[in-house]
Image (cartoon, rainbow, N blue to C red):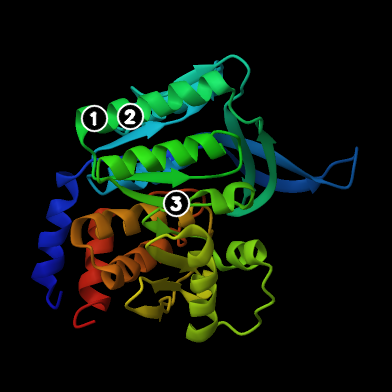
Amino acid sequence: MTSATDYKELFKTFSSVKIGVIGDMMLDTYWWGNVERISPEAPVPVVTVDRKEYRIGGAGNVALNLASLGTPVSVFSVLGKDDDGQILKGLLDEKKIDTGYLLNAGNRITTNKMRVISRNQQMMRLDSETVLPLTTDQEQKLIASVSRFIQQEAPAAIIFEDYNKGVLTEKVIRDVIAICKQHSVITAADPKRKHFFDYRGVDIFKPNLKEAREALNLLIEEVNNNTLIHIHQSLKAQLNHRISFITLSEKGVFYEDGQDAHIVPSHIRNVADVSGAGDTVIAVATLIYTLTKNTAMMAQIANLAGGLVCEAVGTVAVDKSQLLKECQRLLINK
């Protein structure tokens, strides 16, 4: 694409495809306040809380980014039968994210990450969660819900968003990928260490550099095209996936699709918070690739989107109009 009009036309097609997101849904709770003294009980700051805010986190944030871009999205997960689960479902419903396939289980609690923030700095985080893997019955129900979604609604892609909280088990991953292949549905995975090599056969595999090095037991110091191509080849030998899409933190992103391999450098940003940036990157990358099958464009636009959300404090979704302006400003003639 070489003109501003082209990007504008591409963005108009965002609503033309359906995407499913499966994985660990989370509630993000923010307590905002001021620190004016140290506690007399222990050497810790006393935060006077004046505002409490709930946001969609984890795999839900991937769905939120897609919804923010105007893409119809459905979510698949197992929440607890608790207040946090009800709050999270309500937030998803408010954003017009389809929650009809969500499951609830009495033996699980909904993940809630509670952050205490003062003067735009995170003072503390408290996590309420379970990391138990799904039971066999829960696995079967979750797989069946994805299968029903694919058969009834013909989505273009399914995104696996793994936070190691137990929803994405080896069986769930393997069976859902197989169902997607049967129906020509694109698959993308944002992995974590425990099930890193269970995503065999996915189309887009998106670890960050640290995760990839640790999984492969590589001691690579210098980050360049050659070392990253070596990582791709090592991953490919075990996963037989189509595209490696590796995030490089402040250095940008790297992609390798068997024909092209490039580092896309990040653009200068006023970084406030990196929370949720990976969710944005996988959401935008999957959407762009689904619509264009252009790996370079996928990497460039997803890289921009990840940078934009780092300018805000806390977990936020990318703004569609802002992303379009950035594409028109920075990616013309790329």
Q: Residues within 10 Å of mark 3 (few under 14, many from 20)?
A: many
Residue 147 disc label: 2
Q: What amino acid does circle 1 point to?
A: Gln
Relative image position of residue 254 (x, y in whole percent): 44, 73
Q: Which residue is mark 3?
A: 189
Residue 245, image quadrant: bottom left
- Is disc 2 in contact with disc 1, using a CB cutoff of under 8 Å? yes
Residue 107, image quadrant: top right
Disc 1 from disc 3: Cα separation: 21 Å
Name the N-terminal-most of marks 2 and 3: 2
- Is disc 2 in contact with disc 3, using a CB cutoff of under 8 Å? no
Q: What amino acid does circle 3 point to?
A: Ala
Disc 2 from disc 3: Cα separation: 18 Å
- From what the image shows, is residue 245 above or below residue 129? below
Helix, strand or loop at label 1? It is helix
Q: What quarter of the picture does the N terminus occupy?
A: bottom left
